[in-house]
Amino acid sequence: MDIEQLHKEVSYTAVASSGPGGQHANKVATKVLLEFDIENSTAFAKGEHSRILEALQGQLTKENLLKISCQESRSQAKNKELAFAKLVKLLKKSATPKKVRRKRVVPASVKRKRLNDNKKHSEKKANRRFKP
């Protein structure tokens, strides 16, 4: 993944942030909306591209745009940095291939021991029952 290329392909929009903040929040657009077109991006290798599209399928819009918003800070510049960091973290996580799950085989000796223990336990309980 080429982070310099990501910087070029990302578009930002600043809007008024929601929540409390009084006069400052009413006159300053500090919330940042980040849009990234995954479909037409050249920042990924072929394998990464398909894994990312598959992993983020539920978070994409109809136009295959990934939208991330950030309003954690009162500074628009800081929110841009945080939004881009979120994007990079999300893309790195979805680009890594998933581990193949291998079915675990329980050894025969362990099965035999468990069954023998159960059998002994049930015999112990059965011996305590009243037999007229």
Image (cartoon, rainbow, N blue to C red):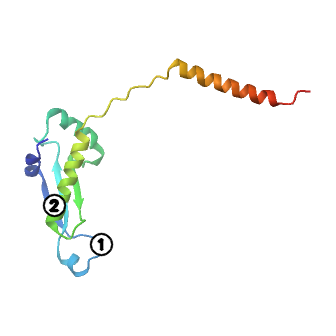
Query: Label 1 neighbourhood size at 10 Å, few (<14), some (14-19), many (20+)?
Result: few
Q: Is 44 above or below relative to 80?
A: above
Quarter where residue 2 is shown = top left
Residue 88 point in image, percent of width and height: 19, 49
Which amino acid, by three-letter code, is at mark 1?
Gly
Q: Is 23 above or below relative to 46?
A: below
Residue with the mark numbered 2: 80
**Position of the N terminus by quadrant:** top left
Could you tell me which secondary element the residue under label 2 belongs to? helix
Which mark is first along the chain, 2 or 1? 1
Quarter where residue 50 is shown = top left
Residue 90 point in image, percent of width and height: 24, 47
Could you tell me which secondary element the residue under label 1 belongs to? loop
Horizontal side, residue 116 vs residue 104: left or right: right
Look at discs 1 and 2 and give the one toward the viewer: 2
Horizontal side, residue 96 vs residue 106: left or right: left
Picture residue at 83% right of the left edge, 30% below the top = 129
Query: Label 2 neighbourhood size at 10 Å, few (<14), some (14-19), many (20+)?
Result: many
Picture residue at 17% right of the left edge, 71% below the top = 29
Comparing 4 with 124, the one in front is 124
- What whole-number distance in Å separates the C-alpha atoms at marks 1 and 2? 19 Å
Residue with the mark numbered 1: 19
